[in-house]
Image (tube, helix red, strand yellow):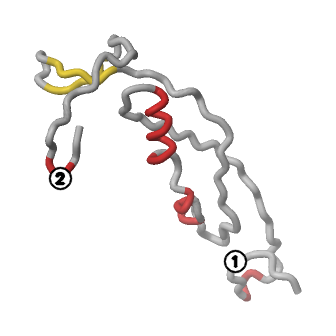
Amino acid sequence: MTKYTNITLMPKDEGKNLYRKTTFFTVIVEQDILAYDKDQADSILLDNGGIDYNKINSSITHENGGVETRHVDANFLNSDPIKYLGKVEYSQDEEDFVINDYADEKPTYKPRQLDLPFGEVA
């Protein structure tokens, strides 16, 4: 006899039918990237962004009352181009750094190196 599922069968299940439904979901991942230009943003995103495919498994599904997950998968379908949202600037009014969505996208300068805690550099 062939085993089609990982569901544990009990005497109370005798006479029941086994069904399978495949459902396709669309998952949208939208990530913000700090970079000097679109090329650098794309490179940073490729190295540090996207989906952790190791976490795409049955733990993202509900399994109760006779439902057992057989397969979970995620595949790349499409993406929009990287979109400019604004430039990081210091605001005198807010006394903090803000995103100025009216600022020109073109790089105006690269800030000087700042010593930051924990060995980070600006």
Residue to which mark 1 is pinned: 7
In the picture shown, does residue 93 fall above or below 52?
above
Q: Quadrant of the C terminus?
A: top left
Q: Amino acid at mark 1?
A: Ile
- Nearest to viewer (mark 2 / mark 1): 2
Dot 2 and dot 1 residues touching (CB under 8 Å): no
**Residue 9 screen position, x and y as percent:** 72, 83
Left or right: 37 as drawn, with respect to 22: left
Which residue corresponds to the image point at 50% horizontal and 35% vertical from the top-left? 42
Q: Is residue 59 left or right of residue 40?
A: right
Examine the rendered structure and indicate whether residue 48 appears above or below residue 9.
above
Q: Residue 105 occupies which quadrant of the picture? A: top left
Q: Which residue is mark 2?
A: 118
Q: Looking at the picture, which amino acid does disc 2 mark?
A: Phe
At 36% from the left and 33% from the top, the residue drawn is 34
The circle on residue 35 is none
As drawn, 102 above or below 60: above
